[in-house]
Amino acid sequence: MITEEIVRERLKTVHYPGFSRNILSFGIVKGIMIQGNDVSVLISLATREPSIPQAIHRGIEEALQTLEGIGKITIDFDLKDPPSHTAAANPGSAQSSIPGVKKIIVVASGKGGVGKSTVAINLAVALQRTGAKVGLCDCDLYGPSVALMLGAEDEQPMATDQNEIIPIEAHGIKAISMGFLLTEDSPVIVRGPLATRYTQQFLRQCLWGDLDYLVLDLPPGTGDIQLTITQTVAVNGSVIVTTPQEVALIDARKAMSMFKKVNVPITGLVENMAWFECEHGTRYFIFGEGGGVAEAEKMGIPLLAQIPLDIPTRDGSDKGVPVASLDPATNRVSAAFADLAQKMIAAVER
Ligand code: ADP
């Protein structure tokens, strides 16, 4: 006899396309009905990409077909527009689902260590220098570095009676990071659904006040948290950070393809650690030359900035003084971030 329990077990073997998690744990299975040997499944999905429901349909059929005695299989879809689509469809009234926040920019990378947080922080500071109100949310639960890079590792955000988190302020921007909520040696054991809930709470429970731009520093890679974020909020623009070397570019491609799947607008690529310039002005292409330029061309997206490998940039991050807070007239890296900020403003306000 076919029971709901048996069907559920089978549905656990069906993955959401492109992700390691199954469709049940994503919460998109809204109903299972069994009549005799006939089974119907209702899936609720926020996507504009037709290949996703098609792949899920195929996956469910394959998973259920092999059940002994199975009758008719009916799979219905309740399809909605994803949040980013809502924003794109109404450019005049682009609303994020975070109260008070006008535009959301995500900074992503395919792999860790390429300078994603460095770019996120400096972009936020450069946006603030244009006179905008800016927030920065470090969504990396497992390797938060924003607190340290802003020189705010000793600050504690306050919570209201309603359990809302009040971001701290540093360098003129509001910021919140898991780094603020964890002590140095507290184990980060949030995984799977708990990590998803934490992230949503993070996004929804912060009292940002009025912001022109909220920059989200995503964890590296293309996992559940990235999907949760892009399905929770309406993203207006995204930056993918890579170094010029092939191993980083391969992963950057994966990040881009994930964003395309979930309809996140890709504003462009930032090539970080593009070169090192010695005191005599000679450039050394430590991680290879032109990888970012070629990749942006291949993917048909703009190359928004090339940031050199630069000692003051690293030193500033370690000391909590982002390089973008220095005068762009006298610091070339700060000027590059100022230019990146202008390009992002132009793209998300378009
Ligand atoms: P990710 O967020 O991708 O893991 P981080 O932003 O934490 O990477 O950067 C990793 C390390 O590299 C940090 O120590 C950071 O200060 C350093 N770094 C990043 N970008 C640069 C750069 N352009 N020049 C020098 N050091 C950099």
Image (cartoon, rainbow, N blue to C red):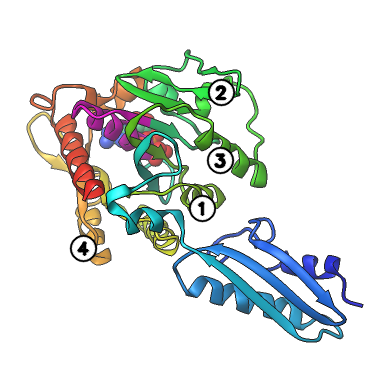
Residue type at the position of mark 2: Leu
Q: Do the residues labelled 4 and 1 touch (CB within 8 Å)?
A: no
Who comes first in sequence, dot 2 or dot 1?
2
Residue at image coords 60%, 64%: 44
Q: Which mark is residue 33?
A: none
Q: Up-down: is 60 above or below 89?
A: below
Residue type at the position of mark 3: Gln
Q: Are marks 4 and 3 in contact (CB under 8 Å)?
A: no
Who comes first in sequence, dot 3 or dot 2?
2
Q: State the CA–CA distance, disc 3 to disc 2.
A: 15 Å
Who comes first in sequence, dot 4 or dot 3?
3
Q: Is the magenta stretch mostly helix, strand or loop?
A: helix
Magenta stretch bounds: 116-135
The answer to whether mark 3 is within 8 Å of ligand 1 is no
- The residue singled out by tag 4 in the image is 297
Q: Which of marks 4 and 1 is in front?
A: 1
Q: Do the residues labelled 2 and 1 touch (CB within 8 Å)?
A: no
Who comes first in sequence, dot 4 or dot 2?
2
Q: Is mark 3 on a helix, strand or loop?
A: helix
| Image position, residue 158 (x, y; %) | 53, 16
- The residue singled out by tag 1 in the image is 227
Q: Nearer the viewer, mark 3 or mark 2?
A: 3
Residue at image coords 27%, 28%: 125
Relative side of 268 to 99, left or right: left
- The residue singled out by tag 2 in the image is 181
Who comes first in sequence, dot 3 or dot 1?
3
